[in-house]
Image (spheres, rainbow, N blue to C red):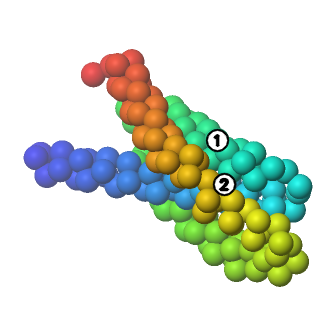
Amino acid sequence: MENNYLKKDYLLVAFGLSAWLAISGFAYSVEILFENLLILTNFDNKFKFWFTDILFNISNILSFYFFLKIIKPNVDYLKWIKFFIILYIITQVFQFLFTSYVGAYIVENYHESWVNQTDFYLKYTFGLILKPIITYVRLIIVSFLFYSFYEKAEI
C-alpha cells in the first residue's frame, strides 16, 4: 500500500516538472517568434523589448492557469505527463529550427535592424535590471495561482 502512495508521489512530481518544462518552452517559443517578427518592422526597440517580455509572461501565466484547471481528482497523470513531454519536445524542435532557419534569414536579410535591436538590448540597462524583477513577479503570480487553486480544492 505504501508503495502505491510513493508511485503517486513520483507521478505528481513528474507531472509538475513536465508541465513546467512544456509551459516554459511554449512561452519562450511565443517570445522568440514575436521578437523575430518585430525585427521585420520599424517599431521602437524599447517597444519590442517590453512587448515580447509581456507576451512571454502572459503566455506563461495563462498556461499555468489552464494547467491548474486540468487537475482533477481522477486525472490520468501519466497521459498528461506524456502530453507535456511531447509538447516540450515539439517546442524545442521548433525553437531549434526557427533559430537555425528564420534567425539566420533575419540576420542575413535584416542585418541592420537585428544589430540595432541587439545593441539596444545590450545597452538598455533599465530593462536589463527590471527584467529579472518581472521574472520574480511572474513566479509570485504563478505561486498565487497555485495557492488559490489549492484553497479551492477539496481535500
Q: Is residue 56 left or right of residue 152?
A: right
Q: Position of residue 24 (x, y in %)?
A: 52, 53
Mark 2 or 1 closer to N-term? 2
Residue 111 appears anywhere in the view: yes
Q: Position of residue 16 (x, y in %)?
A: 38, 48
Q: Which residue is mark 1?
A: 54
- Identify which residue is drawn at 88% across, 77% down: 109
Q: Which residue is mark 2?
A: 31
**Closer to us: 155 or 139:** 139
Which amino acid type is marked by label 1? Ile
Which structural element holds mark 1? helix
- Identify which residue is drawn at 82% across, 67% down: 113
Q: Position of residue 129 (x, y in %)?
A: 50, 48
Which structural element holds mark 2? helix
Q: Quadrant of the N terminus?
A: top left
**Closer to us: 41 or 20:** 41
Residue 71 appears anywhere in the view: no
Q: Position of residue 76 (x, y in %)?
A: 42, 46
- Crowd rating for badge 2 (residues with CA inside 10 Å; few <14, some 14–19, many 20+): many
Q: Is residue 40 above or below residue 16?
A: below
Residue 67: give its label: none
Which amino acid type is marked by label 2? Glu
- Identify which residue is drawn at 56% across, 46% down: 126
> How far apart are the alpha carbons under marks 2 and 1?
9 Å
Q: Is residue 142 above or below residue 132?
A: above
Q: Is residue 80 above or below residue 74?
A: below
